[in-house]
């Protein structure tokens, strides 16, 4: 009489018959370029199961064909897709599901490319700021001739009749940066807070001056302003902490004379101290053009 084998019995039989074609977990890890710990995690989440597990020893074995699946897992991780989602693709075995997975890969790679371009732009802007810092004497007031900029901005909960504290600023700027990123807008390095004709401070973030990006910002509920190149007087206030910088600034500059609080650093690149910059309302053009630090590129 012919005995019907269970699935486990068939697997065991196949393993014993073709044992030389199976790879121990350590061998397979070296072959696909990952650690044994990673393979055990992939097994735990169902993204990459061993082809055979010895019931007596617990040893894991893989086949050479599984290197393809392992590569997909690694690609998922590299492009920021959770490998947990692979289980449904491999369990279903549906070609359409795999096409969906490849589309997801393509979208993730495009997002990574966009983020890399944002970082490249930000580094370039930080270089401009660094050169500006080198061109001035720290702790001294200076005139700056700023280049035109487009700002996305978000109102804070602090009215202009009160000093803007760093915590309120930071909370609002973090929200603004998150919203700008989700809208696919390229941000620049310049950021800060400014008073408006309304009754609250607004935080601002310089963004690329392109119609599409500005349109997305407006559609996303953000206000957008464009500035023209003009000279303004600014002074840095340093201290042991950002909070202390704010205290030092407000003790020297009357609140109603402050136009903008900008270029805040937890640690400046030049002096090594915490610093903020206050922009004054006094904008009388200096007689000596050498006193002006140009930011126009």
Image (tube, grey):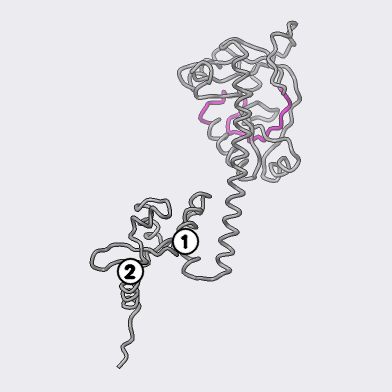
> Could you say which quadrant of the image residue 264 lies in?
top right
Magenta stretch: includes residue 148: yes
Horizontal arrangement in the rendering, residue 30 relative to residue 254 (left or right)? left
> Could you say which quadrant of the image residue 262 lies in?
top right
Horizontal arrangement in the rendering, residue 162 relative to residue 41 (left or right)? right
Q: Is residue 246 visible?
A: no
User: Where does the image place residue 165, in percent across and percent down from the top left?
Assistant: 53, 26
Q: Which residue does the image show at 64% across and 36% down from the upper left?
A: 187
Figure check: 163 above or below 141: below
Query: Which residues are drawn in magenta?
Result: 147-168
65 or 129, nearer to the observer: 65
Q: Which residue is mark 1?
A: 69
User: Where does the image place residue 237, in percent across and percent down from the top left?
Assistant: 55, 15
Q: Which residue does the image show at 68% across and 32% down from the upper left?
A: 151
211 or 200, nearer to the observer: 211
Q: Secondary structure at mark 1?
A: helix
Badge 2: residue crowd in 10 Å (few <14, some 14–19, many ≥20): few
Magenta stretch: includes residue 243: no
Q: Secondary structure at mark 2?
A: helix
User: Where does the image place residue 163, in percent across and percent down from the top left?
Assistant: 57, 23
Q: Which residue does the image show at 61% across and 32% down from the upper left?
A: 122
Q: Which residue is mark 2?
A: 19
Q: Is residue 50 visible?
A: yes
290 or 156, nearer to the observer: 290
Horizontal arrangement in the rendering, residue 241 relative to residue 134 (left or right)? left
Q: Please identify the quadrant where the C terminus is shown.
A: top right
């Amino acid at each position: 009489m012919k005995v019907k084998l269970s699935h486990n019995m068939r697997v065991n039989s196949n393993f014993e018959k073709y044992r030389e074609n199976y790879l121990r977990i350590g061998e397979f890890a070296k072959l696909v370029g990952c650690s044994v710990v990673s393979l055990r995690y992939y097994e735990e989440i169902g993204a990459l199961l061993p082809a055979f597990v010895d019931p007596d020893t617990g040893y894991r074995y893989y086949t050479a064909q599984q290197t393809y699946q392992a590569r997909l897992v690694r690609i998922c991780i590299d492009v920021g897709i959770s490998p947990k989602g692979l289980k449904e693709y491999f369990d279903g075995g549906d070609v359409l599901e795999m096409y969906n997975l490849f589309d997801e890969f393509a979208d993730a790679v495009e997002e990574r490319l966009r983020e890399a371009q944002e970082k490249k732009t930000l580094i370039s802007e930080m270089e401009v700021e660094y050169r500006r810092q080198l061109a001035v004497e720290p702790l001294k007031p200076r005139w700056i001739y700023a280049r035109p900029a487009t700002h996305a901005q978000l109102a804070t909960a602090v009215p202009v009749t009160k000093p803007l504290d760093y915590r309120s600023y930071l909370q609002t700027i973090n929200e603004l940066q998150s919203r700008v990123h989700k809208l696919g807008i390229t941000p620049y390095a310049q950021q800060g807070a400014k008073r408006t004709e309304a009754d609250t401070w607004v935080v601002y973030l310089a963004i690329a001056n392109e119609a599409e990006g500005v349109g997305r910002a407006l559609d996303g509920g953000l206000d957008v302003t464009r500035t023209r190149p003009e000279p303004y007087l600014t002074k840095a206030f340093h201290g042991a902490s950002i909070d202390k910088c704010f205290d030092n600034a407000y003790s020297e500059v009357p609140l109603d004379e402050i136009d903008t609080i900008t270029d805040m650093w937890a640690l400046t690149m030049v002096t090594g101290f915490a610093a903020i910059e206050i922009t004054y309302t006094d904008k009388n053009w200096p007689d000596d053009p050498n006193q002006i630090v140009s930011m126009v590129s």
